[in-house]
Image (cartoon, coloured by chain):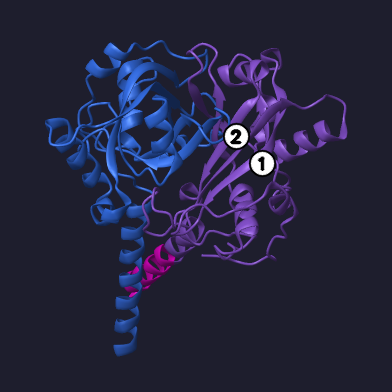
Chain colours: A blue, B purple
Amino acid sequence: MKFKGFFDYFLLSVALWCLVCQNRVEGRLLSLSKPNPDAAASFARWLVSQNSWGVLNTLSSDLGGAPFGNVVSFSDGLPDEGRGIPYFYLTTLDPTASNALKDQRSSLTISEYPVGTCGKADPENPTCSKITLTGKLKVVDGNTGDAEFAKKALFAKHPEMKGWPKDHNFQFFKLEIENIFLINWFGGPKPVTVEQYLQAKMNKLSFAA
Amino acid sequence: MKFKGFFDYFLLSVALWCLVCQNRVEGRLLSLSKPNPDAAASFARWLVSQNSWGVLNTLSSDLGGAPFGNVVSFSDGLPDEGRGIPYFYLTTLDPTASNALKDQRSSLTISEYPVGTCGKADPENPTCSKITLTGKLKVVDGNTGDAEFAKKALFAKHPEMKGWPKDHNFQFFKLEIENIFLINWFGGPKPVTVEQYLQAKMNKLSFAA
């Protein structure tokens, strides 16, 4: 009986542990629910706020003006309080920042795929949404409210940035958005103006699978 | 006692089910093992072959020559038989293909982050690897061995492509690589020539956590 009791306890522990792990891995807690694809501006804001990284594109000064994409982390605000404008923490040791200092034309591209809400759709399937924000990549002026916001927004979503090497001269940058390309369903890009995007209201708190 | 037996059975079932799920989610089966970061060419090939999507950059003819990144699916060969050259299945209904037909300068950017092997590193941390292949994005000539390879490579990794609408005029494209930008550890980009990359040997089959 003693062994049996231990066995029960062991099984119960394993079961509970597994259920906790399952929730952590599969039961993704999204505090902002995914908007209807027809609500294009809100959908775009949701997609930007739910991602923490994307590909930032500049014109390569080293490679004859070729379009040069680079994986970067970004943040548009504190978690669930995104404002839509992506901020970055970049060093000129990396080509993206030095390209932008020569030519500010830039875009940020984000996929829904890593968020985990595309179901079985291929990453290129239009129901698996994607967004490209095109504009100017600019240094955020130091000692301003904007710089303070950039710091809070980035360090909240990317805590390890606080410890990145001081001698690498990291600086805050932001993308001033001029054009929005959003695909979130069949039928081609959804028209969204920058004004609609920045003023979009987000859905209330909810759980989403 | 009968109830106790049922309870044991129930716990055992939950435990076994959870363990299977855990393996499916966390015990990622990679048939090519991740090379040492110092083996730059093999590492680059591994990163390209393990991913099925990335951001393809072109120069936007609609947006004043801005760099325009777009989420796309790609394949460099049959699973675990990648040859390093990325192939795409694109339609001119999408700006990327139409941009490339006007100016072939292009790049493909891929992150290790969605592969799931970055541990706790931030997507911008240099130990979470990333690669940008820069070159020319070209249409693959129809009725050639190259077109046959493109079709097999893409449809094996992206089965739903077979059913994509015929009237959208999808075509096979490939990136002729001219430059490789690889970050896979501290200390800046790893030098890799296109020749080293294309000739790199891949590691043998193995399981990786």
Label 1: element kind? helix
**Crowd rating for badge 1 (residues with CA inside 10 Å; few <14, some 14–19, many 20+):** some
**Chain letter behind tag 1:** B
**Chain letter behind tag 2:** B
Q: Position of residue A165 (x, y in %)?
A: 29, 56
Tell me which label, 1 or 2, sits earlier in the chain. Answer: 2
Residue at coordinates 56% horizontally, 17% vertically from top-left?
B95
Nearer to us in this view, A72 or B76:
A72
Nearer to us in this view, A31 or A169:
A169
Label 2: element kind? strand
The stretch in magenta equals B1-15
Q: Amino acid at mark 1?
A: Lys
- Count of marks, rendered view: 2
- Residue beneath disc 2: B73
In which quarter of the view is residue A181 placed? top left
Q: Is residue B27 magenta?
A: no
Q: CA distance from mark 1 to mark 2?
A: 9 Å
Pointer 1 with pointer 2, Cβ within 8 A? yes
Front: mark 1 or 2: 2
- Residue beneath disc 1: B157
Q: Is residue B2 magenta?
A: yes
Residue at coordinates 70% horizontally, 15% vertically from top-left?
B169
Secondary structure of the magenta portion, mostly? helix
Q: Amino acid at mark 2?
A: Ser
